[in-house]
Image (spheres, helix red, strand yellow):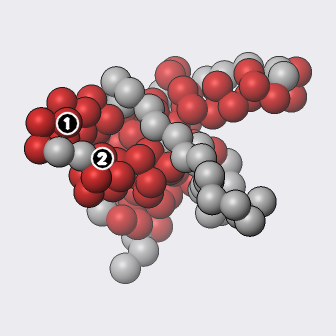
């Protein structure tokens, strides 16, 4: 159930955190905006862990405030939806032991490329 008071305190965590202050991205190139979005996404995940936010409603609210949209879709979402499941399901045990912890801590960031013919 959505808790308005709780969401206000979650919003205050973002708005009062100097790490989330940034310059106007409208003056950055496309690649610079993407780089800033990746940094902000990784920071957001680290702050969720630091603040101990685990409730799905609170996570949604936190993400919404961080990126300023009602339904946050972040570049870092591929890390969770594509890259880490690929490591989990397609690596050998040795590879998984090496790479999955690095991906979980954002020491490596994965991406996605569609290589089959006919997909764009």
Quadrant of the image for the C terminus? bottom right
* For residue 120, above or below residue 79: below
Local secondary structure at mark 2: helix
Q: CA distance from mark 2 to mark 1?
A: 8 Å
Crowd band around label 1 with a 10 angstrom C-alpha radius: few (<14), some (14–19), many (20+): few
Crowd band around label 2 with a 10 angstrom C-alpha radius: few (<14), some (14–19), many (20+): some
Q: How many marks?
A: 2
Q: Nearer the viewer, residue 49 or 34?
A: 34
Quadrant of the image for the N terminus? bottom left
Can residue 9 be spotted in the picture?
A: no
Percent coordinates x, y for residue 101 in the rendering: 21, 34
Residue 98 found in image quarter: top left
Residue at the extreme right: 27
Residue at the extreme bottom: 1
Residue at the extreme front: 117
Q: In the image, which disc is placed on residue 50?
A: none
Residue at the spot 17% in from the left edge and 45% down from the top edge: 92
Q: Nearer the viewer, residue 107 or 7?
A: 107
Percent coordinates x, y for residue 105 in the rendering: 29, 31
Q: Is residue 91 left or right of residue 40?
A: left
Q: Is residue 47 left or right of residue 36?
A: left
Percent coordinates x, y for residue 28 in the rendering: 83, 21
Asked whether the beta carbons under mark 2 and mark 1 sit within 8 Å of each other, the answer is yes
Residue at the spot 33% in from the left edge and 55% down from the top edge: 85
Can residue 3 be spotted in the picture?
A: yes
Residue 75 found in image quarter: top right
Residue at the spot 81% in from the left edge and 29% down from the top edge: 30
Mark 2 / mark 1, whichever is N-terminal: 2
Local secondary structure at mark 1: helix
Q: Which residue is mark 1?
A: 95
Residue at the spot 35% in from the left edge and 52% down from the top edge: 86
Q: Which residue is mark 2?
A: 87
């Amino acid at each position: 159930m959505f808790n308005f008071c709780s969401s206000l305190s979650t919003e205050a965590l973002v708005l009062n955190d100097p790490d989330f202050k940034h310059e106007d991205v409208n003056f950055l190139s496309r690649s610079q905006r993407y780089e800033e979005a990746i940094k902000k996404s990784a920071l957001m995940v680290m702050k969720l862990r630091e603040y101990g936010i685990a409730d799905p409603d609170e996570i949604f609210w936190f993400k919404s405030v961080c990126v300023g949209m009602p339904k946050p879709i972040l570049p870092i979402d591929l890390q969770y939806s594509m890259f880490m499941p690929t490591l989990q399901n397609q690596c050998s045990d040795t590879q998984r032991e090496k790479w999955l912890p690095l991906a979980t801590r954002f020491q490596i960031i994965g991406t996605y490329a569609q290589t089959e013919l006919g997909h764009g």
